[in-house]
Each structure stands twice: as C-alpha cells, then as structure tokens.
Image (cartoon, rainbow, N blue to C red):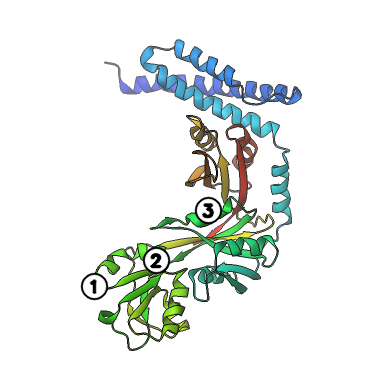
C-alpha cells in the first residue's frame, strides 16, 4: 500500500496542473468575451454547452461521468459569469448603481417623513424610531398605503415588515413588491415581545376575547391554547388591537401587544412575554422612491423570474455559488394571472464595492428571464 503522504504529493502536483490549465481556460474565456462583444453575440450558447458536456462524459470512466458533468457545469457557469461581467459592465443598471453610490450622502438621514402601517405603538413605529432619530410618521391602514405614499412623494421613506424569525415571511408585503417600484435603503431587526394587555381592573381568568395581529397570534399559540373559554380575533395589527381594547370600556377583553402600548393606551399587563419563542425578531425594510446606497451597504435584494423549465432556478443559484456570494434569503411567490410561474426574492450578502457584486449585477441576465434590483443596504441589529 502506498504511503498517504506520497499520494497527497501526487494530488498536489495534479492540482497545480489543474490551476495552470484553469488560468489558461479563463484567458480563453476573456478572448471569447471580446469576440462576442465585437460581433454582438449572446454569452449563452446552449448548443455548444450541451455538446461540451456530452463530450466530457465520453472521456471519463462511467462511474465518473456524473461527477465530470457537475464539475464542467460549474466551470462553464464561471466562464459565463466572467463573459457577462465583461460585456455588460457598462449596462444602464451598473451605471445607476455607480451614480447612487457617488451621490448618496455619507450619513443616513436623522429625520424624515416616514409612512408606516398601523397606529401609534405598532412595531413599525419602533422600527422607524430605530432607523431615524426624529421621524414624522404618517400611519396608513394597509401596507398598500405605505407603498403609495412613497411612490407619490407624500413621504420620503416607508417602513414595512418583511419577515419574522418564527412566523416567516409577510406574504402580503412581498406580493405588493411586485406591483410597486421602490428601493430598499436600510433594514432593521426588532425584538418582539407579546404581552396580554387589558384595562385596569381586568383579571386573567375573566378574559373572554383576545385581539391581535395574525402573526402575533401564531407566535403565542401555546399561551392562547392554555386559556379556557377565550375567543381569539384577528386585528389589523397589535397596536390597533391595544387601542381598541382601551376604547372598549370592557374588562373581559384583552390584546396581544407590546409593552409600549400598555403605557400609550393606559393598559395593564395581565401576562408578559407570552410568545412561544424568546428568540422572536421581526425584520423591517426601509424603502424609498429613488435609489440610495449608503456607505457600508453589504446586503442586496433582488427579484428574479426564471423560465418554467427544469434546472432554471439551479442556474441562478449556481451563479451565486460561482461568484462565492452568500445567499441569506430565498422566497418564492406566485405571479398573479400566470400558470405556475413564480417570482423569486433573493437577499445576498456582498459589499457593493466588491468585484463579485459588479459581476453578479452584470451577469444575471443570461440565467433568468428578468430580474429587478431592489437595492443595496446595511441592516441594523
């Protein structure tokens, strides 16, 4: 039996050859990109790739055929990424991003007119107060109102919940993202603590009706299931539920809401921190009408539509992998009035100044039918 160190020396020698050959291949890729740019040819040549993979499979032993195709699929993905980046580096979107980086102020604004869904005391208000030191807030009954207020210039910014660590994505907000143009300029995570609030004099055993937002109800299911003879009702948000209880004059109703709502609406807490998980956070996105990219932006959001073909999503994911970009969120939502077509939402971690970011923005066109760049930003934790 051969000594392991000797086998590893052989592997190292082979790997050195592979690296040299890979460098040579990427130089050829550069030359191909120049030719295609000069002759106005597309980066993707599906027939060529299919023939190449078949040829690769024919040149290795049968047990290695699948592995060889996986390897060369990744090599060709890297090749396409480089070609796309070289040929699309002057794309309108790349120019728009560069101008936004140059024109955006160095500091995030300290004060602003901000649109939120809900009423005073809602978690959206807490998120706004984390983002801005002095915000003038306009409240809207529905998420749609926040998007419209920003789009029509009534408010400079809007703050919207996008996902919760236990209840998942706020689907209504993601569906509205398809219908509105906006840019995400910052995000923030807010710790969520649900408390059972009622009017002074109320007793836990006397509560018959509880109101709250659907997500708060879902997040406090164990506590609610432990209460006998209680009916749970869905409200538009937790703060609205607290306000309704305060105005009801009844001591047999309560709301699942935040501690700040207890002070705001003169309620008392019959039970504190009733959520099922103490690690309960909601992530909020701050949106603007125009693209703003502040220093330190290291997170980017994208909306992508792929062909309804086998492997279409894989090709997009392979592009992230080929560029060594970390994918932190993937969400799919059905496209209205279409048959089984989906919009995919991606959040990726990559500094805007990184060359990988420029390559990603320039190279997504050849792996998806369409995509929207939603902005690059940093997240407050």
Q: CA distance from mark 1 to mark 2?
A: 19 Å
**17 versus 239 height, above or below:** above
Q: Is residue 250 left or right of residue 138?
A: left
The answer, for residue 289, to whether it is visible in the render is yes
> Quick one: label 1 or label 2, which is nearer the N terminus?
2
Q: Which residue is mark 2?
A: 216
Q: CA distance from mark 3 to mark 1?
A: 36 Å
Q: Indicate the position of residue 373 as horizontal and vertical percent values.
A: 62, 47
> Quick one: label 3 or label 2, which is nearer the N terminus?
3
Circle 3 Cα neighbour tier, 10 Å, few/some/many (<14 / 14–19 / ≥20): some
Circle 1 Cα neighbour tier, 10 Å, few/some/many (<14 / 14–19 / ≥20): few
Q: Are marks 3 and 2 in contact (CB under 8 Å)?
A: no
Q: Is residue 206 left or right of residue 37?
A: left
Q: CA distance from mark 3 to mark 2?
A: 19 Å
Q: Are marks 3 and 1 in contact (CB under 8 Å)?
A: no
Q: Indicate the position of residue 283 as horizontal and vertical percent values.
A: 48, 60
**299 versus 275 height, above or below:** above
SS at mark 2?
helix
Residue at 61% in and 32% down: 366
The answer, for residue 59, to whether it is visible in the render is no
> Any mark on residue 228, and which?
1
Quadrant position of residue 108: bottom right
Q: Nearer the viewer, residue 83 or 156?
A: 156
In the current view of this chain or complex, which residue is farthest to the right?
A: 38
> Any mark on residue 174, and which?
3
Q: Nearer the viewer, residue 126 or 67?
A: 126
Residue at 52% in and 46% down: 346
């Amino acid at each position: 039996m051969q000594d392991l160190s000797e086998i590893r020396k052989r592997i190292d020698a082979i790997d050195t050859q592979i690296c040299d050959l890979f460098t040579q291949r990427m130089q050829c890729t550069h030359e191909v990109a120049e030719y295609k740019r000069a002759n106005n040819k597309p980066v993707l040549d599906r027939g060529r790739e299919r023939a190449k993979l078949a040829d690769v499979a024919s040149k290795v032993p049968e047990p290695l055929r699948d592995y060889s195709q996986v390897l060369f699929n990744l090599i060709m993905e890297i090749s396409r990424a480089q070609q796309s980046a070289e040929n699309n580096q002057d794309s309108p979107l790349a120019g728009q991003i560069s101008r936004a980086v140059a024109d955006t102020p160095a500091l995030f604004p300290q004060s602003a007119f901000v649109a939120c869904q809900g009423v005073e005391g809602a978690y959206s208000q807490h998120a706004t107060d984390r983002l801005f030191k002095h915000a003038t807030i306009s409240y809207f009954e529905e998420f749609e109102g926040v998007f419209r207020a920003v789009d029509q210039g009534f408010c400079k910014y809007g703050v919207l919940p996008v996902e919760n660590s236990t209840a998942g994505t706020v689907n209504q907000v993601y569906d509205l993202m398809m219908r509105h143009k906006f840019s995400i300029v910052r995000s923030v995570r807010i710790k969520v603590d649900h408390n059972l609030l009622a009017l002074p004099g109320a007793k836990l055993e006397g509560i018959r009706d509880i109101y709250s937002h659907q997500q708060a109800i879902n997040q406090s299911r164990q506590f609610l299931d432990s209460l006998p003879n209680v009916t749970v009702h869905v409200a538009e948000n937790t703060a609205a539920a607290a306000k309704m209880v305060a105005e009801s004059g009844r001591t047999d109703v309560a709301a699942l809401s935040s501690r700040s709502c207890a002070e705001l609406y003169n309620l008392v807490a019959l039970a504190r921190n009733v959520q099922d998980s103490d690690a309960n956070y909601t992530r909020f996105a701050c949106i603007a009408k125009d693209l703003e990219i502040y220093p330190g932006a290291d997170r980017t959001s994208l909306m992508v539509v792929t062909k309804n073909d086998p492997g279409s999503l894989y090709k997009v994911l392979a592009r992230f992998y080929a560029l060594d970009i970390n994918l932190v969120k993937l969400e799919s939502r059905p496209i209205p009035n279409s048959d089984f077509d989906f919009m995919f939402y991606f959040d990726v971690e990559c500094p805007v100044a990184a060359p990988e970011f420029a390559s990603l923005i320039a190279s997504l066109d050849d792996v998806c039918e369409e995509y929207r760049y939603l902005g690059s930003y940093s997240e407050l934790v």
